[in-house]
Amino acid sequence: MFTKTLYFVSIAIESMKYKAIADFIYSKLNSYLKNNKFEEHIDKNDIEMLTRDIQICKKLIDDRGEFEIRKTSDSAKSRVDYILGLKMD
């Protein structure tokens, strides 16, 4: 769950800087921003940095002004879901 949250939050922050965000990132973002439980083996410093990034992301969305939500093809969405669903060794 840590990796997925990290991915979505990082992409969202970068997207908001450019005033445009992919629709699948925007639609899943809320659930990832609310996540506060991660795997036990994740380093505490990594969790603190991700928590800080989540706060930045929330602030960018709250202070968002206007930004474009870009439509993404179903094939692009399914590729991302597939990649994020792969088991890590």
Image (cartoon, rainbow, N blue to C red):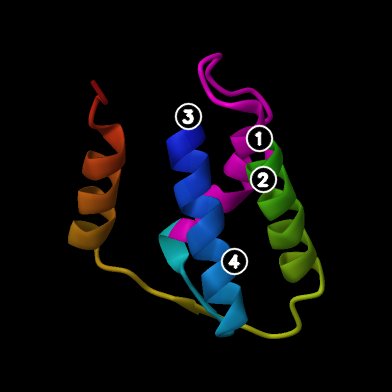
Residue, x 81% and y 74% (percent of image)? 63
Residue, x 67% and y 45% (percent of image)? 49
Query: Quadrant of residue 34 in the image?
Result: top right
Q: CA distance from mark 4 to mark 3?
A: 18 Å
Q: How many marks?
A: 4
Could you tell which of marks 2 and 3 lies nearer the N-terminus?
A: 3
Query: Quadrant of residue 81 in the image?
Result: top left
At label 3, the amino acid type is: Met
Q: Is residue 59 left or right of residue 25?
A: right
Q: Are marks 2 and 4 in contact (CB under 8 Å)?
A: no
Q: Secondary structure at mark 3?
A: loop
Could you tell which of marks 1 and 3 lies nearer the N-terminus?
A: 3
Look at the image and say whether residue 35 sits in the magenta stretch.
Answer: yes
Please provide the residue range marked out in magenta: 25-47
Residue, x 23% and y 31% (percent of image)? 86
- As rendered, which of 41 and 77 lies closer to the eye? 41
Q: Position of residue 19 (x, y in %)?
A: 59, 84
Q: Which residue in the structure is indicated by mark 1?
A: 45
Which disc is residue 49 wearing? 2
**Up-down relation of residue 15 to residue 87 (above or below):** below
SS assignment for the magenta stretch, majority:
helix
Q: Is residue 82 left or right of residue 16?
A: left
Residue count near mark 4 (Cα–Cα under 10 Å), binned few <14, some 14–19, many ≥20: many
Q: Are marks 1 and 2 in contact (CB under 8 Å)?
A: yes
Labels 1, 3: front one: 1
Q: Position of residue 9 (x, y in %)?
A: 56, 54
Residue 31: tell me if it is visible: yes
Q: CA distance from mark 1 to mark 4?
A: 20 Å
**Up-down relation of residue 28 to residue 43 (above or below):** below
Q: CA distance from mark 2 to mark 3?
A: 15 Å
